[in-house]
Amino acid sequence: MDKMFVSPDTYIQGSGLLEHSAEYIKKLGKHILIMSDETVWKIVGDEFADYLLDNDFEIEKVVFNGEASVQEIERITKIAKDKKVDVVVGLGGGKTIDTSKGIALEANTKLVIAPTAASADAPTAGLSVLYTEDGVFDQYKFYPKHSDLVLLDTKVIANAPVRTLVSGISDAMATNIEAKATAMKHGVTMGNGAATFAGRAIAAECERVIWDYAYEAVESNKNKVVTPAIEAIVEANTLLSGLGFENAGLAAAHAIHNGFTAVKGEIHHLTHGEKVAFGSMVELVLEDTPHDVLDKYINFWLTLGLPITMEDTHLDQLSEDELMQIGKLATAPDETMKNMPFEVTPEMVVNAMKAASAYVNAYRKSHDIKPIFERK
C-alpha cells in the first residue's frame, strides 16, 4: 500500500467564530444552503443565517430530518441543485455533518462544516457513516475530497449539553487505541492507504491531550465557559481524532459499535461515543491488555460516567443469539475488525463483551469512583 495522509482544506477554531465567519466563507461563494435540524435552527441557526444575510450572502434554509441516510442526501441535494447554490453548510451534530458531505458532492458545491458540539470527529473526516431510514448502520461512504472549511465555534460548543462533549471525548479516546492495533497489523487506514508517521503521531497526541485536559474541560462545559481546557478538548475531539482515525486506522472499537446495529433495544438510546466507549473496552480485553493499563482506562471512563458494562449499555437484556448477531456483524469481512493484529471471531467478541463487563463490575466494587458527569 502507498502511504497516504488526507485532511480538510482549512480548519478554524475560536470563541465566537460564527459571528465573524463571513470573511472565511465568502472565499467559497455567496449563495449558501444551510442545513440543520429543528433544534439547532432555534439555538444558533437562525442567528447565523441572519448574520450571513447582513453580510450580503443569499441564504437557503433547509431542515434536516435527523437521519444520515441516502434518501435524505437525495432529498436535500435536489433542493441545492434547484436553488443553484455555491456552498452547502452543515450546521449541527455528526449526522447533520455526514449528510452535508454527501449533498455537497452530489450538488457539486463547496462544503462548510460548522459543528455545534464536539461530540464526534465527523467534521474533519472525508467519509460519512450512513444509516437506513430506520437507523440501522448502512455503509461508510467515502468522498474524493474533504470539506473546504471547518468552523469550530468554541463559545457555541461550551454552551452545548455536557453529554455531547463527554461523548466526543470517548470517541476520541478510541483513536489511539485503534491506531495502535492497526499499526501492529500494518492495516489499511480509512483513507485507503498505509498509515503515515504523521497520522500515528496525531493519534497519540489526541490521547495525550485527553488525559491532560478532559476533566477540566467537562467542568468548563458544565459552567458554559470557554477555557484553554475546553479549547484543547474541542481540538482533540474533532481535529486530532478526525485526522488520527482517518490516517491511522480504525479497528475493533468501531467495528463493535457498528455491530450493535444488528439488534434492537435500549442501546440505541446511547450516543455514538457512549457506544464506542464499550467497544474500546472490549477491544482492550481482546488485546489482553495488562490490568494496570486497563485499570487506567476504566477509571477514566467511569469518572466521565461512560457506559462500559453490559448492564450500562443494556446489552444484558439480549439473548445469546442476539449477542452473536452483534459478533457476526462486527467481524464481517468489510468491517474495521480486519485491522486487529489477529483474527477475531464472533465468539471472541461476545466473550470479550462479557469479560469486559465482569471486570468493570469487579473494579467498581473495589474502587470508590465519583463520576464528574452522570447521564440522565
Image (cartoon, helix red, strand yellow):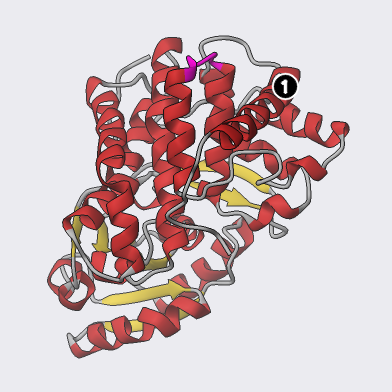
Q: Residues within 10 Å of mark 1 (few under 14, many from 20)?
A: some
Q: Of helix, strand and loop, which one carries label 1?
A: helix
Q: Is residue 96 left or right of residue 332?
A: left
Q: Is residue 85 above or below residue 342?
A: below
Q: Is residue 151 or residue 286 the one in the foreground?
A: 286
Residue to which mark 1 is pinned: 351
Q: Is residue 111 left or right of residue 350?
A: left
Q: Is residue 62 or residue 186 the one in the foreground?
A: 186
Residue at 42% from the left image edge and 50% from the top image edge: 168
Q: Is residue 273 visible?
A: yes
Identify the magenta region. Answer: 287-291
Q: Is residue 367 or residue 148 the one in the foreground?
A: 367
The x, y position of residue 190, in whole percent, is: 43, 31
The x, y position of residue 352, in whole percent, is: 66, 23
Main secondary-structure element of the magenta-colored stretch: loop
Residue type at mark 1?
Answer: Asn
Q: Is residue 112 visible?
A: no
Q: Within the image, what quadrant is residue 25 found in?
A: bottom left
The x, y position of residue 82, in whole percent, is: 47, 76
Q: Is residue 278 magenta?
A: no
Residue at 40% from the left image edge and 37% from the top image edge: 173
Residue at 87% from the left image edge and 37% from the top image edge: 319
Question: Which quarter of the figure is the N terminus placed in?
Answer: top left
Q: Within the image, what quadrant is residue 52 found in?
A: bottom left
